[in-house]
Image (tube, rainbow, N blue to C red):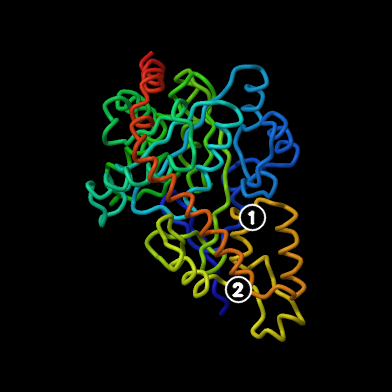
C-alpha cells in the first residue's frame, strides 16, 4: 500500500510537504505576481531578493496597500514573535521583510511578543520561561536594524492592560464555532487559547490606516478572522504578505524547529557549530560519488545548502545563477557548495552578534516608544 502524504499547517505546527499553490487556494489568498512585485519596487525605489525570487509568494490586499501609499494615505506594519526559545535563521525572514518595508516606505512597525500564547499552547513552557525569551528574542529582532523612532515592541503580559479593552470587544464578535473551524480547537483546548486570537488581532487596529502584516503563511488564520470583523469597528481589513518556510537542514519538508537542533541554525550558534551542522545535516542534492556527480551533476532544487543561499544568504542574482549552473553541471561539488554556505552564514552571524550586543543598550527605545504607544492608545480607545 502506498503511504498517503499528510500535511498539517496551523499557527503552531507545520508538518509534511508544503504545497504553496494549494495553500493559496485553500486559504483564499492571491499569488504575488510579477506585476505587483514591480509596482512595489517602483514605489520603494529598490528591489528585494525576497520579492524577486518568490520567497514571499502570496498576499491579501497588498495592491490596496500600494493604492493607499500612492494616494498619500500611508499604511503601517505589524508582525510578531512567539518567544518559546532561541531564534533560528528561519524566524528572521518576516522581520527582514518588515524592516525593508519600514526603511523604504518610512512607516511605523509594531512587533508583538506573544509570551501568553506560548505559555498557553505548550504545557512544557512556563510563563517565566516565555517572558525570559521575550527579552532575548527582542534583542535579536532589534539587531536586524529597525528604526527606534518608528518601531514599538511590546510583550503581551506586560502590555495587556492597554490592549485588553479592545481585545474583549473583538472577542465579543467571535464565537467558538468560528475559532474551532479556523484553528481546529477541540473540547479539551484550554479557554486561554480559545480567547487568544482576539489578542493577536488587536494590533491590526493600532492606527487608522491599513495594516500590512509580513509573516509566514501559517499565521494567516488570524487575519481571516480579523477581516470578517474589522470594518464593523471602523478599521480596514488587514493586508498580508506571506513567505515560504526556510527548509530545515534535514530536507525540504516542513519547517525548521527550534526544539530539534539538527534542523536549524540558531542565531547564537558559533562558527564551529555552524560548520558541524551544515556538514552533517544539510540535505544534499548531489550524487553518491564524486565521479557520478561530475558526470550527472547535482540537483539544486532539493539541495538545502543551495536553497538557503537562494532564500537568504546570496543576494547577488548573477552569483546565485552561477552557483546553480555549476552545481547542475557537476563542476561544483556538494562539499564545496556547503563551504560557500558556511562562510556566508558565519559572516552574517558575526555581524548579528555585534548588533545584538548594541541592542542591549537601546532596547528601551523600542519597548518604551512613547509616541507610538500613545498614538496606538488614542486609536483603539476612540
- In the image: residue 285, left or right of residue 107: right
Q: Which residue is mark 2?
A: 284
Identify the secondary structure beneath mark 1: loop
How far separated are the C-alphas under marks 2 and 1? 18 Å
Instruction: Examine the rendered structure and indicate whether residue 70 appears above or below residue 382.
Output: below
244 relative to 226 in the view: left or right: right
Task: Report the front residue among 213 and 168.
Answer: 213
SS at badge 2 = loop
- Tag on residue 314? 1
Percent x, y of residue 94: 52, 44
As displayed, is residue 294 above or below residue 62?
below
In this view, 275 is above or below 30: below
Q: Residues within 10 Å of mark 2 (few under 14, many from 20)?
A: many
- Name the one closer to the observer, 358 or 370: 358
Q: Name which of mark 2 and mark 1 comes first in the sequence.
A: 2
Viewport quadrant of the C terminus: top left
Q: Position of residue 355 (x, y in %)?
A: 44, 44
Classed neighbour count for the residue bearing mark 1: other residues with Cα under 10 Å, few (<14), some (14–19), many (≥20): many
Task: Determine the image quadrant of residue 302.
Answer: bottom right
For the point 50% across and 72% down, the residue is 281
Whether label 2 touches label 1, CB < 8 Å = no
Q: Is 106 on the left-hand or right-hand side of 355? A: right
Amino acid at each position: 500500500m502506498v503511504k498517503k502524504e499528510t500535511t498539517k499547517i496551523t499557527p503552531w505546527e507545520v508538518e509534511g510537504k508544503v504545497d504553496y499553490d494549494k495553500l493559496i487556494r485553500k486559504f483564499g489568498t492571491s499569488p504575488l505576481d510579477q506585476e505587483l512585485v514591480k509596482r512595489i519596487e517602483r514605489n520603494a525605489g529598490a528591489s528585494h531578493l525576497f520579492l524577486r525570487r518568490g520567497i514571499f509568494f502570496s498576499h491579501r490586499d497588498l495592491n490596496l496597500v500600494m493604492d493607499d501609499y500612492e494616494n498619500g494615505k500611508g499604511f503601517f506594519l505589524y508582525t510578531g514573535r512567539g518567544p518559546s526559545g532561541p531564534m533560528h535563521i528561519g524566524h528572521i525572514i518576516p522581520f527582514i521583510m518588515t524592516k525593508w518595508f519600514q526603511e523604504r516606505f518610512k512607516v511605523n512597525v509594531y512587533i508583538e511578543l506573544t509570551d501568553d500564547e506560548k505559555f498557553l499552547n505548550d504545557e512544557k513552557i512556563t510563563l517565566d520561561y516565555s517572558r525570559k525569551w521575550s527579552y532575548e528574542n527582542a534583542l535579536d529582532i532589534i539587531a536586524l536594524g529597525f528604526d527606534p523612532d518608528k518601531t514599538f515592541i511590546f510583550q503581551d503580559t506586560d502590555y495587556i492592560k492597554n490592549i485588553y479593552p479592545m481585545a474583549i470587544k473583538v472577542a465579543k464578535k467571535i464565537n467558538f464555532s468560528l475559532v474551532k473551524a479556523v484553528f481546529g480547537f477541540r473540547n479539551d483546548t484550554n479557554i486561554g487559547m480559545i480567547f487568544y486570537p482576539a489578542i493577536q488581532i488587536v494590533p491590526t487596529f493600532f492606527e487608522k490606516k491599513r495594516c500590512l502584516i509580513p509573516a509566514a503563511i501559517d499565521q494567516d488564520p488570524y487575519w481571516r478572522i480579523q477581516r470578517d470583523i474589522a470594518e464593523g469597528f471602523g478599521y480596514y481589513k488587514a493586508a498580508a504578505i506571506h513567505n515560504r518556510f526556510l527548509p530545515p537542514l534535514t530536507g525540504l519538508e516542513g519547517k525548521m524547529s527550534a526544539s530539534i537542533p539538527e534542523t536549524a541554525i540558531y542565531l547564537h550558534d558559533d562558527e564551529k557549530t555552524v560548520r558541524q551542522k551544515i556538514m552533517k545535516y544539510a540535505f544534499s542534492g548531489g550524487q553518491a560519488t564524486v565521479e557520478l556527480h561530475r558526470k550527472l551533476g547535482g540537483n539544486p532544487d532539493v539541495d538545502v545548502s543551495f536553497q538557503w543561499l537562494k532564500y537568504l544568504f546570496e543576494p547577488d542574482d548573477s552569483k546565485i545563477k552561477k552557483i546553480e549552473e555549476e552545481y547542475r553541471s557537476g563542476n561544483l561539488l556538494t562539499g564545496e557548495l556547503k563551504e560557500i554556505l558556511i562562510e556566508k552564514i558565519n559572516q552574517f552571524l558575526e555581524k548579528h552578534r555585534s548588533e545584538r550586543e548594541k541592542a542591549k543598550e537601546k532596547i528601551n527605545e523600542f519597548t518604551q516608544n512613547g509616541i507610538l504607544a500613545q498614538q496606538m492608545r488614542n486609536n483603539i480607545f476612540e
